[in-house]
Image (tube, rainbow, N blue to C red):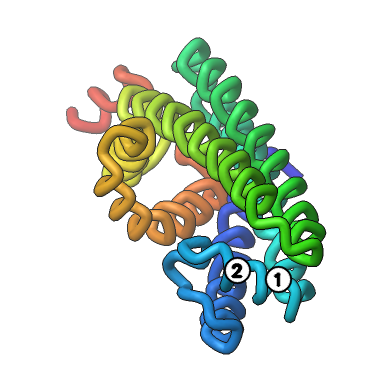
Amino acid sequence: MKLQRLGGYASIILLCVIVVAVVIAANTYPRLGLSLLNEMADPAKLMAALEASPSTFRMLQPVGILMALFFVIVTLSLQERMGEKAPNTMRFAVIAASIASALQLAGSLIEIPALISISGARDVSAFRAIIGITEGLAEGMINAWGWALLLIGCAAVRTRGLPQILAYILLVCGIAQVLRFAIPQLEITIVLVPVFLIWLGIALLRKQQPKPAAKEMAAAKG
């Protein structure tokens, strides 16, 4: 399987997994006394929910692991698509995506097991400490992935390796994620994520049409 097709499947599969995870959370969180939008707002409620239904949170844990894999696979597939025309830009994008992947993987593997263990001990201070650590890892991941998206968007605009509207969506999402630590309101751009995931998946699965040479274009016009 070509790397670009693998990246296309990864985008679509990740979107499907996220939708399933949101549906599961929407159906289970209210019964556990948690808010879907901010489940960590009340540590006491979260500790009680973890103790009451640890399997629910373990079931959602693979989403973060799949995201970590997605960052690297999709960026490598885009490097294969645009790397010849923008080698340095895509090389830096792969580095940024790898950093985001490492931070995401660390947070996903640490958070749920640690919180479930601590909730059983009813240690609120340790519980808050773990939340602080994992939220710090998440913010680092968001910033690093923002740089990757920004670089990918720049390469796509310059090389026309992706549909131009999609390229600008990636640019907007990248800028928003890079600046989100200073402007939390930019989190609203998360609504664009399903759009660029499905569009990017389709773009990578479709065979890129070779552009005709300048002489052939001139001959065709003549």
Q: Position of residue 48 (x, y in %)?
A: 66, 75
Location of mark 1 (residue): 50
Q: Is residue 105 left or right of residue 144?
A: right
Q: Is residue 125 left or right of residue 62?
A: left
Residue drawn at 40 percent across, 39 percent down: 162
The answer to which quarter of the image holds residue 101 is: top right
Q: Is residue 189 left or right of residue 84?
A: left
Location of mark 2 (residue): 46
Residue type, numbered disc 2: Leu
Residue 133, relative to residue 29: is it above or below?
above
Between 210 and 88, the residue placed more toward the observer is 88
Which numbered tag is attached to residue 172? Answer: none
Q: Is residue 70 visible?
A: no
Q: Position of residue 27 (x, y in %)?
A: 56, 86
- Of helix, strand and loop, which one carries label 2? helix
Q: Is residue 189 visible?
A: yes
Residue type, numbered disc 1: Leu
